[in-house]
Image: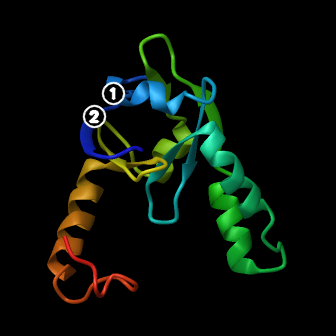
Amino acid sequence: MFQGATELSVDAKGRLAVPTRHRDALVSGGAAVVLTAHPDGCVLLYPRLAWEPIGARIQSLSSFNEQARWWQRLLVGFAEETSLDGQGRILLSPALRKFANLKKDVMLVGQGSHFELWDVSAWDEKLARAMSQASSSPPPGTENFSL
């Protein structure tokens, strides 16, 4: 399970060092990971085996539905399979860096089965907005939830 938020740096060649504590879990089903775009403006990072059913489901959406086509263009069109190098780094393609405006400082945010990768300033802005709305009403299905 991928959890936690970590601020990291992308190097001049577009490489990101995955924190040591997550490396083995990311490649547990093989050496490959999948990076892709998310409609919210971040990059998703999945172990390849966790991505496969998601990619298949997205590809099964109707190509006659305009919204489904755009989801396919984003999630499948930007999907890239890559491997961690000997130093535990992954290469972020120029297309994905441009899509999510990833420059130097990024946030790696665990989401259970995968990670989200955000530009730090975009993350800070979205987090501040979410926190200002947090007390207004809980998400659907969590009305009786307690921490």
Q: Is residue 111 above or below residue 91?
A: below
Is residue 76 at all visible to an observer of this figure?
no
Label 1 neighbour load within 10 Å: few <14, some 14-19, many 20+:
few
Q: Is residue 24 left or right of residue 95?
A: left
* Residue at 22% across, 64% down: 127
- The quadrant in which the N terminus is found is top left
Q: Earlier in the sequence, mark 2 or mark 1?
A: 2
Q: Quadrant of the C terminus?
A: bottom left
Image coords of residue 22 (percent x, y): 39, 31
Q: Amino acid at mark 2?
A: Leu
The image shows residue 28, relative to residue 126, as above or below, that is above
Figure colour scheme: rainbow
| SS category of the residue bearing label 2 | strand
Q: Residue at x 78, y 60 (%)?
A: 59
Which residue shows up at 82% across the image and 74% down it? 62
Q: Identify which residue is drawn at 24% across, 73% down.
A: 130
Spatial distance from mark 2 to mark 1, Cα to Cα? Answer: 14 Å
Left or right: 143 as drawn, with respect to 44: left
Frontmost residue, 94 versus 85: 85
Where does the image place residue 120, in percent across and percent down from the top left? Answer: 26, 49
Dot 1 lies on which element?
A: helix
Tell me the kind of residue under disc 1: Arg
List the residue tagged with mark 2: 8
Q: Which residue is mark 1?
A: 21
* Camera-side residue of 97 and 8: 8
Q: Give the quarter of the image for residue 56.
A: bottom right
Q: Name the spot of residue 42 as percent of width and height, x first.
A: 43, 55
The x and y percentages for residue 100 are 44, 52
Q: Among all residues in the image, which is located at the extreme top?
A: 86
